[in-house]
Amino acid sequence: MATVTKETGFVRYACIRQKLPREIVMLRGTGCKWRRCRFCDYHLDASTDTEANYRLNKQVLSYVTGRYGILEVINSGSFTDLDEKSMQAIIDTCHARAIRQVHIEFHWMDRLQVAPLKERFAGWGIELWAKMGVETFDIPFRKSYLDKGIDTPSSSPTPEDIACYADEVNLLMGLPGQSTESMLEDLHIALSLFKRVCVNVMTANSAPIQPDQRVILRCRTFVLPAYRDNPRVDILTDNSDWGLGEELPPGEVARSEG
Ligand code: SF4
């Protein structure tokens, strides 16, 4: 298990102004417990020093103003990787800034912890939306190629099973082997069962699976145009589209907001 892999150094606060305007923070936890997805390397933003994580997260949360009444919290993993003091700091920040809706991310393995967290937030008058990284509803692809950690050798949750826990899903497009039809089918299923969808177009990183530019072209040409103005669909064509993740001098967590 890795210990500290990266200190602050990233933009960790931003505002999303389109579709569902909200503030977004990228907090740091102990790290994704799965770490096996063959397309991912962003689980490297983690530290086993929970006190240092809390200090960092508290600093990041201090940038939140409540201007939109909605906050999205990501942490390069699942919300269960955040320490308890950071979780309470999220609640306290929302309470202080009159934020009434929070979006968090989780891995399928943590699904049973979603309902208790929703209850906890509801106790503070905050509606919690849980977003799950599904990437695709094509089970063999997700299971054998992506190694997403949702499927076991003997069973796979249906989209309806996933909808019992998730309000929103992340989809990943632009991978070798994806077809126009499979990408359209993923969006069709996602929009029929979930409140919102975030489409991430694959970008190059250090993971074994790398983007396929021909698939990306098909995605941009035949899939995404119909959804560009859909208020329920966020489209990220680059990891930094929301303004997070850019490297900063040590100690800084945000660019100044106008
Ligand atoms: S995609 Fe999510 S679950 Fe998979 S290794 Fe990366 S952080 Fe972990």
Image (spheres, rainbow, N blue to C red):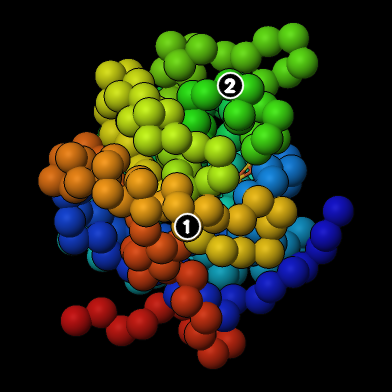
Q: Which mark is residue 139?
A: 2
Task: Give the percent coordinates (x, y) of residue 81.
Answer: 64, 46
Q: Amino acid at mark 2?
A: Ile
Q: Residue furthest right?
A: 1
Q: Residue furthest left?
A: 229
Label 2 neighbourhood size at 10 Å, few (<14), some (14-19), many (20+)? some
Q: Quadrant of ligand 1?
A: top right
Which residue appears at 60% of the width and 30% of the height?
142
Residue 223, above or below 207: above
Which of 113/216 is in front? 216
Assess whether mark 1 and mark 2 are in contact (beta carbons under 8 angstroms).
no
Please state if 44 lies on the left or on the right of 3 as rendered.
Answer: left
User: SS for tag 1?
Assistant: helix
**Split into 4 quadrants, where in the image is the C terminus?**
bottom left
Residue 59, above or below 218: below
Residue 67, above or below 154: below
Please state if 12 lies on the left or on the right of 146 as rendered.
Answer: left
Q: Which mark is residue 213?
A: 1
Q: Residue furthest bottom?
A: 249
Task: Give the percent coordinates (x, y) of residue 228.
Answer: 19, 47
Which of 156/140 is in front? 140
Say if residue 243 shows up in the picture: yes
Task: Give the percent coordinates (x, y) of residue 196.
Answer: 29, 34
Please state if 132 lies on the left or on the right of 219 as rendered.
Answer: right
Label 1 neighbourhood size at 10 Å, few (<14), some (14-19), many (20+)? some
Which residue appears at 50% of the width and 60% of the height?
203
**Alpha carbon distance from label 2 to label 1:** 23 Å
Q: Amino acid at mark 1?
A: Gln
